[in-house]
């Protein structure tokens, strides 16, 4: 419980820092204050400081199983009773070997796939099969080539019915603040990989959903861009205060970014372990050299086991 | 097996050769540079093109006069010129060209629009698309020009039968192309839209339409040619105006020079139509780029 209170203390401190920044950044955060998410988070925090009750869960996957049936082929059990419970404002990573069902979990949460069994709850409400409730950044950036960067970023708002002019007005300061200044009028093919990911992530964030799903967003980037993007993502997460579920197969990335890590087993995907990351924030880059970090990373690597592709199937068996 | 000797044998042209012990040798490349073509100046190219044309016409004219080309069947450039002057001077040119032009453009517009709408409608229901598809394929396989007499009977001798021919030729191609475009819409992008909570109409307007537009643009050029063909064939069957009727009439009275005049005017018309379509293409491509601004306001 002490750990929990410490965590909530941190996030409260971060929030007051955010509030302090209002005068500095002006309308930017004033706009964010309007969102329901912020209100609700404040309420829960109040409750938390009054009575020392555990924080309610933001999103809860209850015993989710997924079976894929392709005609003429044997059934595939992709997910086996996955149970994941995440508190508001947390940064949680899912790691697991390729093909273990990470993207499938996201599709279920985003309502794009009806789970064979189990349910998804957000704020205690059953939302299985509903679309548009969470922000989902798919593995590819999926920017529309016929839209400018600015118009790509506002796509989510547009779909929610925000008039284009207002949406653009709202998005512009974000583009400037988060490293896309001067690219508003460019078309996606003119952007570097990192820039495209930034645009895709901003598009996801500007929908004001409280839960954000990121499916290997930095998987295709080179090492240097990747670490810059990690810093950028942490800054964004701290500013926006959303609940993030992050899929990666890079253990170091998971440990560096997350509050919690779920390790999944190879197909069928099961939760093999649920780990807390006891590293204080903000985390400097140098944290990767500390003992705690190294031990945690080793532990995760052990849990993942040898990559199945390292050995030919017959040798492995 | 024939013994080829101890040493590796190299085939002419330096191709891969197998040694006696079975190892494969890749022979070294002889020293040479990247072949570079020198491009001529545009003026020089144009001069060549013009020169060739002049030579051909001169050869034709001289050939008829000297007698090694049969002037009765081939006519000759000077006569073609005289016919052209009369045709244009007496004012038939305007009526006939306008008739063909109008019928072609109408057939093109109606066929392309209706075809595109049908193709796009397949996005809305997979079942409906599957049911309709075999009919489309059958109709596409049918030689539609063979239907021309029927079309003229049904639609009469006037403009509408020519337009109908143009539509018959262009519509199904457009539908099938559009359908291919619809099937090629990126399913991940579709998932992205739905993950943002989009309605189907939003996916259609903001994703399917812009994705299929390049497919529609690609079919425009084909369609204008087909619409012209349809119109001409319609005029061949039965008509009171049009360049097709002119050519048919000229053939019936053995006025070969007038046939050439008809073909010549038709070619000019065809070029004009392609220019119009090129303009339309450019305009539509801009529509794709501006789609966000206009499409979003809806
Ligand atoms: N639509 C589908 N039909 C059949 N099998 C599928 C389908 N989608 C995913 N799978 C299978 O489910 C497993 C999990 O896939 P996925 O969630 O994409 O894995 P990950 O994202 O962890 O790499 C894979 O083995 C894949 O082959
Ligand atoms: Mg995946």
Image (spheres, rainbow, N blue to C red):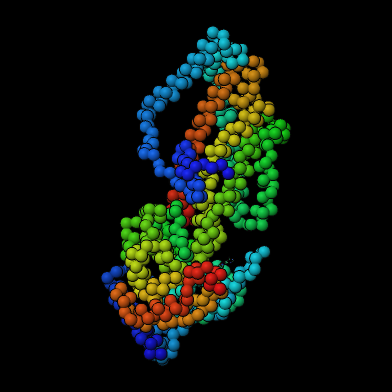
The quadrant the N terminus of chain A occupies is: bottom left
Q: Quadrant of residue B170?
A: top right
Q: Quadrant of residue B74?
A: top right
**What is the x, y in percent for residue B60?**
53, 15
- Left or right: A197, with B241 as reference point: left
- Left or right: B193, with A1 as reference point: right
Q: Return the residue nearer the eye: A180 or A197.
A: A197
In the displayed orientation, state which residue is furthest to the left. Answer: A24
- Left or right: A46, with A118 as reference point: left
In the displayed orientation, state which residue is furthest to the bottom. Answer: A51
Query: Does residue B155 show up?
Result: no
Query: Does residue A112 show up?
Result: yes
Q: Residue at x 51, y 66 (%)?
A: B195
Q: Return the residue nearer the eye: A259 or B179.
A: A259
A86 relative to A171, above or below? below
Q: Residue at x 68, y 37 (%)?
A: B143
The image shows a total of numbered marks equal to 0
B85 relative to A243, above or below? above
**What is the x, y in percent for residue A188?**
40, 55
**What is the x, y in percent for residue A99?**
52, 69
Q: Residue at x 62, y 53 (%)?
A: B122
B163 relative to B200, above or below? above
The quadrant the C terminus of chain A occupies is: bottom right
Q: Residue at x 34, y 68 (%)?
A: A227
- Left or right: B219, with A228 as reference point: right
């Amino acid at each position: 419980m002490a750990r929990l209170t410490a965590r909530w203390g941190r996030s409260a401190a971060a929030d007051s820092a955010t509030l302090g920044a209002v005068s500095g950044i002006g309308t930017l955060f004033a706009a964010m204050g309007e969102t329901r998410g912020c209100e609700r988070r404040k309420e829960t925090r109040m409750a938390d400081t009054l009575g020392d009750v555990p924080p309610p869960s933001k999103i809860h996957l209850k015993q989710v199983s997924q079976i894929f049936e392709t005609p003429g082929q044997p059934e595939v059990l992709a997910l086996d009773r996955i149970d994941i419970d995440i508190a508001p404002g947390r940064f949680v990573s899912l790691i697991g070997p390729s093909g273990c069902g990470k993207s499938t979990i996201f599709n279920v949460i985003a309502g794009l796939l009806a789970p064979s069994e189990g349910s998804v709850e957000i704020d205690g409400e059953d939302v299985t099969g509903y679309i548009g409730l969470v922000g989902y950044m798919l593995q590819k950036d999926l920017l529309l080539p016929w839209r400018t960067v600015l118009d790509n970023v506002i796509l989510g708002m547009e779909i929610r019915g925000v008039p284009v002019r207002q949406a653009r007005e709202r998005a512009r300061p974000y583009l400037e603040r988060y490293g896309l200044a001067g690219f508003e009028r460019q078309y996606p093919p003119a952007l570097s990989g990192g820039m495209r990911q930034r645009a895709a992530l901003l598009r996801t964030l500007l929908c004001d959903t409280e839960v954000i799903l990121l499916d290997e967003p930095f998987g295709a980037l080179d090492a240097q861009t990747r670490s810059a993007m990690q810093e950028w993502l942490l800054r964004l997460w701290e500013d926006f205060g959303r609940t993030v579920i992050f899929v990666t197969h890079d253990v170091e990335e998971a440990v560096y970014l997350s509050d919690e890590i779920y390790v999944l087993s190879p197909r069928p995907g099961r939760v093999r372990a649920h780990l807390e990351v006891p590293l204080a924030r903000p985390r400097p880059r140098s944290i990767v050299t500390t003992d705690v970090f190294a031990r945690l990373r080793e532990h995760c690597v052990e849990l993942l086991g040898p990559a199945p592709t390292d050995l030919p199937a017959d040798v492995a068996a | 097996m024939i013994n080829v000797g101890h040493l590796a044998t190299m085939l002419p042209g330096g191709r891969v050769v197998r040694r006696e012990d079975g190892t494969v040798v890749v022979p070294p490349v002889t020293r040479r540079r990247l072949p570079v073509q020198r491009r001529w100046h545009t003026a020089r190219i144009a001069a060549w093109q013009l020169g060739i044309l002049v030579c051909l016409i001169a050869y034709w004219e001289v050939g008829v006069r000297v007698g090694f080309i049969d002037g009765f069947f081939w006519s000759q450039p000077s006569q073609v010129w005289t016919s052209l002057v009369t045709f244009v001077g007496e004012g038939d040119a305007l009526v006939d060209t306008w008739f063909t032009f109008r019928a072609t453009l109408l057939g093109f517009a109606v066929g392309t629009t209706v075809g595109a709408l049908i193709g796009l409608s397949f996005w809305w229901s997979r079942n409906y698309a599957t049911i309709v598809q075999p009919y489309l394929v059958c109709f596409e396989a049918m030689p539609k020009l063979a239907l021309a007499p029927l079309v003229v009977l049904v639609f009469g001798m006037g403009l509408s039968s020519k337009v109908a021919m143009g539509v018959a030729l262009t519509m199904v191609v457009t539908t099938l192309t559009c359908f291919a475009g619809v099937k090629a819409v990126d399913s991940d992008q579709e998932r992205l839209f739905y993950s943002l909570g989009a309605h189907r109409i939003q996916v259609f307007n903001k994703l399917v339409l812009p994705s299929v537009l390049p497919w529609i643009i690609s079919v425009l050029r084909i369609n204008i040619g087909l619409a012209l063909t349809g119109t001409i064939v319609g005029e061949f069957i039965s008509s009171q105006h049009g360049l097709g009727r002119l050519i048919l009439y000229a053939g019936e009275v053995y006025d070969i020079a007038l046939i050439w005049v008809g073909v010549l005017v038709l070619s000019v018309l065809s070029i004009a139509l392609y220019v119009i379509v090129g303009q339309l293409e450019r305009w539509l491509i801009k529509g794709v780029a501006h789609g966000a601004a206009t499409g979003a306001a809806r």
